Structure formats: structure tokens, C-alpha cells
Amino acid sequence: MLAGKRILLIIGGGIAAYKSLELIRLYQKAGASVVPVLTRAAEQFVTPLSASALAGEKVYRDLFDLTDEAEMGHIELSRAADLVVVAPATADLMAKMAGGLANDLASTLLMATDKRVLIAPAMNVRMWDHAATRRNLATLLSDGVLTVGPDEGDMACGEFGFGRMAEPPAIVAATEAAFGGEALSGPLSGRHVLVTSGPTHEPIDPVRYIANRSSGAQGSAIGGALARLGARVSFVTGPTAIAPPHGVEVIAVETAAEMLAAVEGALPADAAVFAAAVADWRVLRESTSKVKKAPGEGPPPLELAENPDILASVARRNETRPTLVVGFAAETDDVIANATAKRARKGCDWILANDVSPGTGIMGGSENAVTLITEAGAESWPRMGKVAVAERLAARIAAALGEVAA
């Protein structure tokens, strides 16, 4: 997959930078050429001479290099590569990327490139869990940036948790996936997971519709997290401005009826996660022309009909029912009680309940606070970024399907 590919490798300033030297070697072994770019902080951990010797290429370090910039070097570098890889992607580099900053060579290249970007985050566990990092990661994912890792383990600082940079072989596998190879290996390899996301739009006439405030960010994060664990993901999404996650099969729909048809067409699946905020009602008789206001007359009557219950229809199937069916319950009052009742009513295995009452800032925001409701009871998760919620849910799904297989 990598033979003949040209990779621009941006090495950030973290202790994991030493792994970038092994990454260069593995890329070359796979037939790719590597052009290294070192940040000033990266030079504290690896030398330009080491990176240049292994890559067999000049190492680029300075934005204002007279020789390079005489030919607009940062533009040429950013466009000549087939893929830009950032490893390690420090918290600082991720923040610059999310904020659109370009005050050194690395960040300028990332702004100027027209190629896909793959990052391998690496930082202290507290930095990885920080709300700012979570917001930045969500922004990068919505911009279409690809990610691999981080892994869980011991840190150089003596702490333990997520934040270790993915190992070089895993980054190479992610690179191959970016070029259209097979899904990443992981605990969900060989599994098919169906995910619904976003709102539905139920037309009133050609210019108006009934909808809700769902952004689709949580569903997109879940689809991406499952794909990163190796799952084949069928991603059924309503209209949304959020970019779909990389590495999934995207099935775009508009109405609840279209979403139901897409879901049924995607079955069978090992697991299904219904994160979409499907409109409960639709207009019974959609107007084929714009409904006009008439002077002296009130608003036109809208006769509503109930939309299909997609979650319940899948959860109560006898054949082609996924092993694990997960629903969402966005509530404003009596959250746990209402979500528990919904789980029983729908017949699903798990419900993720979240409080979207005014003042929480959750509906359409970058964070979520959910309670996982299962047959065993309710488990409240702390408020965290939507990507973190997705990663935690994906890990639980992998564990549950692993127990069934065992």
C-alpha cells in the first residue's frame, strides 16, 4: 500500500519523538519515502542528523530559511506529499491545528497542505483528558483529520493512563488505511457495527421542515471510535454540518422513513448504536409548493403523523437482530427514570441517557455527560468531551462483543 508514496513526517516536541526514528525506518521498509520536519521542541529529543540519516532526505526546521523560501518551500513541501503525518502530535500542535495558527514551519505546513493529515497524539494523561484537548480533537475530527492512538500505559512522567503515542507499526497500519487499505486491526476487527447519527428533517413544503437541535457530533465521534478499533462501520446520518468520520461507509438520508430503510438495508450487524435524534413526527401531507401567508388568515393547520420507531423496530427483531443494541435518551426531566423506562419500552440492551435541559449546554455543545443504563443498573460517567464519550462507549462495546464470542 505504501510503495512509492511520499510522506511528510512532522515530528513534535515530546518524549515520544524518539519513536519517530523507528517510524521512518518502517515507512522506508514498506516502500515509502519520508521527508522529516522537526519543530524546535522536537530537536530537544531527536537530532536533525539522525532523522536525515535514516530518511535519506534533508530535514526541514525553519520557516524563514532563505534558500528554501526563495522557492516558497513551505508551500511546495505541503503539496508534494501524498500524506502528512504528525507523530508525535503534542497538545500544542493539536491546539495550533484546531485554532488555525501558523507561526512556525510545522503549523504553516499543516495550514498550507491540500493533502490528508494523520496525527498520532502523545502527551501526559491529564493533558489528554483536559477539556481544551478534547475540544481541539473534536474540531480536528470534524475537519477530517485522521487519528491513531493514543494508547494506555505508563508515562515518562510516572503516571499511568491514555496518552502514550501509538507504536510505530500501528501508525504504519493507520497510514495504509488512509490510502484505502483494510480497516485498522483492533478488538472490533471482523465486526460490523451500525451507527445512526444527526437529526432528521421532515419536510413541510419545499423550503420548510421539522427538525431538532442535534449537531451529529456525538454520533460522528462514535462512528470514528468504532472504526479506530477495527470495526466495519455503516454510518447512517441525517443532514448535518459535521464531517463524517474517516473509514466508515456513509449512508446519507434526510427523513426518518429514509433512515429506517437505510438501517434495514445495512443489517445484519454485530452491534447497532442509535445516536440519531429522529423526529417523532412528520407532516402527514407535505405540500409540493411553498405554503404562502395569506393576509388576514392565521397559520395553516399542520396535520402530523407519527414517524417509525427505528430503535424499537431493530431491538425487537427475531432475525437479524444485532447482538448488542444501544439507544440514546436525551431528556430534560427525571433523566434516569425516563431513560430506564425507555430502555424497557424499546427492548434495547443499553441506553445512554443525557440531560439536555436548558443551562447544561450539552445539546449541540462539545461535551456530554451520560449515564449508561443496562440490565444491571445505571452507571454515571463524568462530563467529558464527545470524543472521550465515544472512545469509552466503543471500548465497552468491544468488551461486550468479546464476552459474547468467548
Image (cartoon, helix red, strand yellow):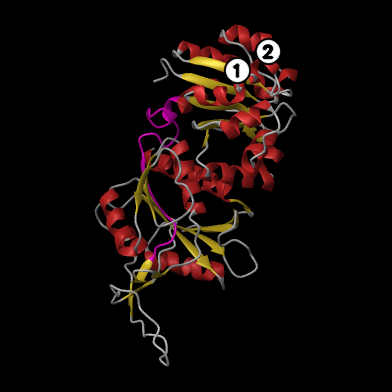
Specify the amino acid type for callout 2: Pro
Q: Which residue is mark 1?
A: 36
Q: Is residue 111 visible?
A: yes
Does the stretch in magenta take in 184?
yes
Viewer-nearest residue: 48 or 259 = 48
Give the number of the disc on residue 3. Answer: none
Helix, strand or loop status at disc 2: helix
Q: Quadrant of residue 19?
A: top right
Quadrant (top left, top right, bottom left, bottom right) of the C terminus: top left
Determine whether, in the image, residue 175 is placed left or right of residue 362.
left
Q: Is residue 15 above or below residue 288?
A: above
Determine whether, in the image, residue 333 is placed left or right of residue 228.
right
Q: Earlier in the sequence, mark 1 or mark 2?
A: 1
Picture coordinates of residue 32, whole percent (x, y): 46, 15
Specify the amino acid type for callout 1: Pro
Picture coordinates of residue 356, whole percent (x, y): 57, 66
Does the stretch in magenta take in 388?
no
Picture coordinates of residue 201, whole percent (x, y): 39, 65
Q: Is residue 289 above or below residue 37?
A: below
Helix, strand or loop status at disc 1: strand
Q: Residue at x 63, y 12 (%)?
A: 51
Q: Is residue 185 above or below residue 29?
A: below
Q: Residue furthest bottom?
A: 296
Q: Residue at x 65, y 18 (%)?
A: 18
Q: Report if the CB atoms under discs 1 and 2 are less than 8 Å apart.
A: yes
Q: Which residue is mark 2?
A: 48
Q: Residue at x 44, y 46 (%)?
A: 244
Quadrant (top left, top right, bottom left, bottom right) of the N terminus: top left
